[in-house]
Amino acid sequence: MSSDPQARRLRQPFRSSEPGSGGRSSVEQPPSGEPEQGELFPDPLLGSGLDGLPDQLAGFRGPTACQVVGITYRQLDYWARTGLVVPSIRGAAGSGSQRLYSFKDVLVLKVVKRLLDAGVSLQNIRVAVEHLRRRGIRDLAGITLFSDGTTVYECASPEEVVDLLRGGQGVFGIAVGGAMKEISGSIKDFPVERADGGTVDDSPEDELSRRRARRAIS
């Protein structure tokens, strides 16, 4: 990382300990108590708050994730088998079983694709993925990732972005909240499947509307 004093004010970059790194590792841990499970599907309008189906109870099959993210099924399968992005709702266990990806999984897949497109190494992407998966949806919406093609940095405020750019390091940026809105807008047209194998009728948006209507009546 640059010796620039402003750059040092940034959060730790996503990087693993490597020879010659001076022992720098490390992904900053999220605050204790940050929810890791039970996040909610973001509202399709994403700005009016988060509401909907518990993220660990319903999700999307592999082909849907591929289409929304813009990757091949072969890539998806390879990333799952190598542990890069593993479906958090249901894995492929036995003949005929289908992986089931949560909304957050699909978001992480999108970020992985963009980092790969930017030329970031798989080793550094793995470290970034571990960090992102520990974050709640609300935290992810406010994060921007920057990469110089080698290291991935997290910026959570405009000041941190300015500091990083002044250090001459950030050349490629990913606004995670922007990716979230993009996915929210396209994934609502795809079927949602429950963890127990049942299906959710219509789209996530329709399901959200029905749940809100029931709450309003009660």
Image (spheres, helix red, strand yellow):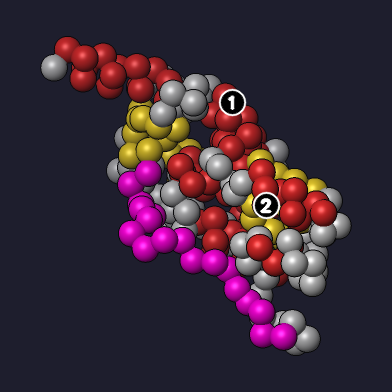
Q: Nearer the viewer, residue 147 or 105?
A: 147
User: In this rendering, is residue 142 above or below 131?
Assistant: above
Query: Residue 110: horizontal and vertical position, in percent?
Result: 64, 44
Q: Quadrant of residue 65?
A: top right
- Provide the residue designation for mark 1: 186
Of marks 1 and 2, which one's residue comes earlier in the chain?
A: 2
Query: Residue 180: horizontal and vertical position, in percent?
Result: 57, 36
Query: Residue 74: horizontal and vertical position, in percent?
Result: 68, 51
Q: Quadrant of residue 15?
A: bottom right
SS assignment at label 1: helix
Q: Nearer the viewer, mark 1 or mark 2?
A: 2
Q: Which residues are magenta?
A: 22-39
Quarter of the image where the N terminus is located: bottom right
Which SS does the magenta portion mostly show?
A: loop
Seen at 73% across and 61% down, the residue is 6
Answer few, some or many: residues within 10 Å of disc 1's Cα (few below 14, many 20 plus, some between 14 and 19). few
Q: Residue furthest left?
A: 218
Quarter of the image where the C terminus is located: top left
Seen at 63% across and 34% down, the residue is 178
Which mark is on residue 160? 2
User: In this rendering, is residue 92 above or below 21?
Assistant: above
Q: Quadrant of residue 215?
A: top left
